[in-house]
């Protein structure tokens, strides 16, 4: 059905443009801008993400080939490569950060009632980071190694719906554990992280905020056992203990007791030792919480494979952060569309469909929810076959 609107323009209708306009005004993003304002830059960035464009020349060539459809997409003119490059360098990246966070807030509301593998009446977050390698000669503002540059994407993933609740972009040298200094802590929520985040002073701040953490113990941890709970080893739980941290400085950093759970993974046969400040959940639930941490790893793998955040359209810090935040906003936007339209199609399939049909004028639901059970009417033609006698 031809609605007179392209699929791209129908997707863009899910952007809160009035809110986006207020964000732009707050940062004076369009002050002195003659062409390619902040909203146009986002449309172009979303277009490049949805159609897998990998360079400024690629974007220009694709838009030129469909110049007669750009008006219906909300794109007024085909931008020159230099104009788009200047816009990426000069439009404040914080504008797109705030837009992404606004979309994240909406998406989390839509997905808050989704069921999880763990029946737990609490918000569960997985914390981790991924490194995006860069060329040191071009991105000298993001040092990482002697001969390499990189940016880190520190992500707090809400496991209900796989929506990032918090993202911080830093240079490659920032240690993962330092993100706990700027991470907003939500009371009664669970924060699941690997042992790279074990810092007792920072973990104690999470405890004091009324939240819970689940992490793995380091091999050289110095602690003493105070009490052991009886366990059923046939379930894989080797021990469930209450411990106290030894050491002059470590005991001051975390002066209260901790819970230690040793679990033997039946799939790999490895012994895993978990630390948590939660004393009420069954030990198998603690192990299941840590197992679900892998969802954040899958999230990183997914966005690196299906969004354009490994090759950048500009080399400045502002251009890189603008592109990353636009990619995050696009990912969350598609998740919102999927939930609003109650689509059963996966995000991967939706992106695949949009990548080849973004210029089509068809209903968005019909395009993104293909009917695999279509039945075709039988041929009722009365014309005789050539070989009928």
Image: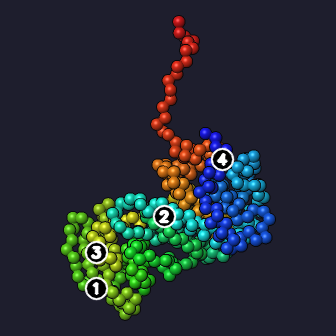
Circle on res. 224: 1
Q: Secondary structure at mark 1?
A: strand
Q: Earlier in the sequence, mark 2 or mark 1?
A: 2
- Evaluate if marks 2 and 1 touch, with contact meaning CB atoms under 8 Å apart: no
Q: Residues within 10 Å of mark 1 (few under 14, many from 20)?
A: few
Residue 73 spot, x, y in % from top left: 69, 51
Please indicate whether residue 48 sits to the left or right of residue 159 in the image: right
Q: Residue furthest front?
A: 18
Q: Nearer the viewer, mark 3 or mark 4?
A: 4
Q: Nearer the viewer, mark 1 or mark 4?
A: 4
Q: Secondary structure at mark 3?
A: loop
Alpha carbon separation for disc pair 3 and 2: 27 Å
Alpha carbon separation for disc pair 1 and 4: 67 Å
Write the residue at 64% across / 43% down: 3
Residue 149 spot, x, y in % from top left: 62, 72
Q: Earlier in the sequence, mark 3 or mark 2?
A: 2
Q: Nearer the viewer, residue 292 or 367?
A: 367
Residue carrying label 3: 280
């Amino acid at each position: 059905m031809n609605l007179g609107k392209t699929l791209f323009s129908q997707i863009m209708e899910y952007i809160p443009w009035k809110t986006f306009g207020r964000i732009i005004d707050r940062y004076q993003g369009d002050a002195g801008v003659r062409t390619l304002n902040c909203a146009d830059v986002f449309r172009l960035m979303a277009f490049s993400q949805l159609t897998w464009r990998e360079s400024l020349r690629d974007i220009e060539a694709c838009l030129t080939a469909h110049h007669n459809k750009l008006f219906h997409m909300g794109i007024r003119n085909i931008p020159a490569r230099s104009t788009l490059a200047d816009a990426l360098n000069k439009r404040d990246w914080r504008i797109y950060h705030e837009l992404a966070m606004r979309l994240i807030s909406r998406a989390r509301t839509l997905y808050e009632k989704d069921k999880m593998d763990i029946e737990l009446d609490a918000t569960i977050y997985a914390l981790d980071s991924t490194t995006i390698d860069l060329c040191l000669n071009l991105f000298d503002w993001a040092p990482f190694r002697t001969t390499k540059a990189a940016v880190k994407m520190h992500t707090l993933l809400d496991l209900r719906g796989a929506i990032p609740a918090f993202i911080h972009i830093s240079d490659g040298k920032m240690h993962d554990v330092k993100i706990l200094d700027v991470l907003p802590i939500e009371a009664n929520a669970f924060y699941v992280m690997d042992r790279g985040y074990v810092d007792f002073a920072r973990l104690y701040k999470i405890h004091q905020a009324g939240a819970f953490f689940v992490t793995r113990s380091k091999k050289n941890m110095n602690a003493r056992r105070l009490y052991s709970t009886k366990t059923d080893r046939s379930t894989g739980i080797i021990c469930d203990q209450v411990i106290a941290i030894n050491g002059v400085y470590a005991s001051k950093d975390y002066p209260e007791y901790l819970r230690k759970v040793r679990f033997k993974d039946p799939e790999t046969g490895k012994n895993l030792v978990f630390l948590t400040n939660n004393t009420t959940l069954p030990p198998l639930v603690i192990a299941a919480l840590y197992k679900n941490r892998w969802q954040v790893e899958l999230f990183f793998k997914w966005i690196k494979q299906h969004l354009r955040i490994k090759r950048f359209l500009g080399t400045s810090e502002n251009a890189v952060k603008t592109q990353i935040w636009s990619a995050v906003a696009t990912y969350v936007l598609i998740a919102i569309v999927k939930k609003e339209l109650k689509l059963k199609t996966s995000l991967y399939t939706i992106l695949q469909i949009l990548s080849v049909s973004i210029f089509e004028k068809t209903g968005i639901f019909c395009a993104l929810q293909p009917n695999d059970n279509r039945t075709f009417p039988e041929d009722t033609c009365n014309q005789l076959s050539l070989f009928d006698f």
